[in-house]
Amino acid sequence: MIMKSHTVKQGMPEAAVKYQPYPQINIPDRTWPGNTITKAPIWCSVDLRDGNQSLVDPMGHDRKARMFQLLLDMGFKEIEIGFPSASQTDFDFARWCVEEGNVPADVSLQVLVQCRPELITRTFESLQGANKPIVHFYNSTSELQRRVVFAKDVRGIKQIATDAAKMIADMAAKAGGGFRFEYSPESFTGTELEVALEICNAVSEIIQPTPDNKLILNLPSTVEMATPNIYADQIEWMCRNLDNRENLIISLHPHNDRGTGIAATELGLMAGADRVEGTLFGNGERTGNVDVVTLALNMFTQGIDPELDCSDIERIKEVYEYSNQMVIPERHPYVGELVYTAFSGSHQDAINKGMKAIKVANKPLWEVPYLPIDPQDVGRSYEAIIRINSQSGKGGIAYILQADYGINLPRNLQVEFREDIQRITDEHGKELPSKAIHGRFIERYVDQPGARIRFVDHHTYPVGEHKGLRVVAAEITDDGETRRIEGKGTGPIDGFINALSIYLGIDMSVADYSEHSLQHGSNAAAIAYVEVEYSGGKLFGVGINTNIVAASLEAIVSAANRVLEQKQR
Ligand SMILES: CC(=O)SCCNC(=O)CCNC(=O)[C@H](O)C(C)(C)COP(=O)(O)OP(=O)(O)OC[C@H]1O[C@@H](n2cnc3c(N)ncnc32)[C@H](O)[C@@H]1OP(=O)(O)O
Ligand SMILES: CC(C)C(=O)C(=O)O
């Protein structure tokens, strides 16, 4: 007999025995894959309810109030402020919103309640005097919860929903109307579509939505159980089959258990949904609710007005961290500390070129490699776009010197200086801040502590009979001793390098020269870069001076000192 070898890896049970695949949805003529998102959905923040109920320490009044104000400022028109029948804190907060929250007329407060009479009664108490509030009621409809939580069949589960719908409709009518309604077949993604449809239609039949007061049918991915295309199929199927679709607002409420909440929401919108419930940066039960900031900015970067103001993402982050007492990871889309930063050389090079190209094009269209959004659009600066470590390249270093200090290195100097920086970052294994890069540049090329030669002054005069040729007479110091040197050339640079070559006994010539004015720096006006050629190769010198000629001659001295250094090695 042949024994079958055991193939299960140590530590993990056999997947096929323990878990089952999610069934496919039978909708062969699905249309959503051909659709695109063209406008923002109705946004509803559930930070103060689903987000709050998942916190280690739920929010008290101050944390709620600060978050509430932010949500208003961002432009949310629907805000689920809590579960007033669950706790005194939530009840009191609902009352505060109604009485003191300065809620704009176009904003609806929303509250959640289970389909339980005593909780519904308390919920209505919490909303007295509110302007067009949304009463959101729910019950679990999934096959699993019907079996293990409620011990009821579909009829019994439907009854819970319809009894609550009747009570809510009656109480709203008695209170003089002015309410809006939302129903969630909770754990929709674990519910057979036909069952969800039957229960939703039954609730809708009782609520009697109209074009002026549509029923919000919220189809939550309470637990994300399958790939996002399955959720889209479910939404398209429901949109096709629900009664009175025109009087319904189809709402998504995705969670992120598989890490695909954003994708599921986007496909759900393509499948016909009108509304999205989610939280800032995705706080919420387990792996969280869908992140509405990411969703909104995904739309924005496709040229769609997201109708949510995310222009001060640092404030949104700050309030998130204060109210939820949680921190946002460095890689979180759009807001993480590092999401606009490139350390790697080729990315930096492309960003550097892209930023320059944008400046030259002088058009509003954003096209910078590796940066899908302009950081300034969300209130972030360009400061951290490029940071330098051992993975960085010359383009990145050049960008930093340019952006932070107005120093525009010529290409060959970028190559030369990068070697120096690379040696330092390799040695220390750490990031090198902009200040340290600048400091190193100034020390190596401009200040040159301990260098032998210093430029002091110069003047030129014509060489008698030679038209165009001039004598350069200069004063330098050599190890502190004043020296007068002389050379000839067509101009001061030419003549001075000739003078220094004679004095030092090293044949040097100018291979490249450039200069520009310096916007940054205290009293410096011009920076000159001179590439000097000598028998050992080529290297750069840099001079900074308010006088452009002096800056150039200092650059030659800087190069000469570096030649001397090379020769001593
Ligand atoms: C997917 C979601 O996020 S849904 C929202 C969940 N949010 C919260 O639960 C936060 C706030 N909740 C609470 O403070 C409490 O759960 C309360 C106040 C609502 C209820 O508290 P309690 O009645 O003490 O306890 P508990 O929540 O355990 O009640 C469960 C009972 O309610 C029933 N139940 C649960 N949900 C619903 C519902 N939507 N409609 C009707 N009955 C429900 C359960 O079947 C169970 O019934 P049983 O007592 O007959 O077994
Ligand atoms: C109450 C419902 C909408 C919910 O929070 C969920 O299903 O996650």
Image (cartoon, rainbow, N blue to C red):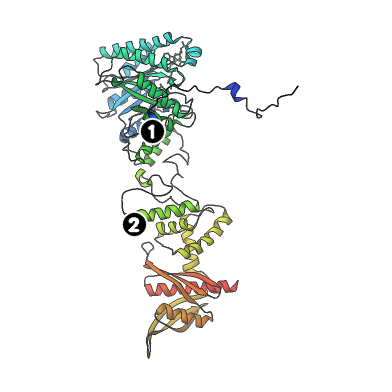
- Amino acid carrying label 1: it is Val
Q: Secondary structure at mark 2?
A: helix
Q: Relative to 62, is 11 on the left or the right?
A: right
| Res. 253 visible in picture | yes
Task: State yes or no: Cβ of the residue under disc 1 lies below 8 Å from any atom of ligand 2.
Answer: no
Q: How many marks?
A: 2
Q: Residue at x 50, y 62 (%)?
A: 415
The disc at residue 360 is: 2
The quarter of the picture where residue 178 lies is top left
In the rendered image, residue 555, in percent from the top left (x then y), is placed at 45, 72
- Ligand 2 sits in which quadrant? top left
Residue furthest bottom as drawn: 465
Q: Is residue 205 above or below residue 7?
A: above
Q: Secondary structure at mark 1?
A: helix
The quarter of the picture where residue 537 lies is bottom right
In the rendered image, residue 34, in percent from the top left (x then y), is placed at 38, 32
Near-viewer residue (495 or 112): 495
In the rendered image, residue 248, in percent from the top left (x then y), is placed at 31, 21
In this rendering, the label closer to the viewer, 1 or 2: 2
Near-viewer residue (95 or 153): 153
Q: Residue at x 46, y 34 (%)?
A: 326
Q: Quadrant of the N terminus?
A: top right
- Amino acid carrying label 2: it is Val
Near-viewer residue (89 or 472): 472
Q: Residues within 10 Å of mark 2 (few under 14, many from 20)?
A: few
Residue hosting label 1: 292
Of mark 1 and mark 2, the one earlier in the sequence is 1
Q: Is residue 372 above or below residue 417?
A: above
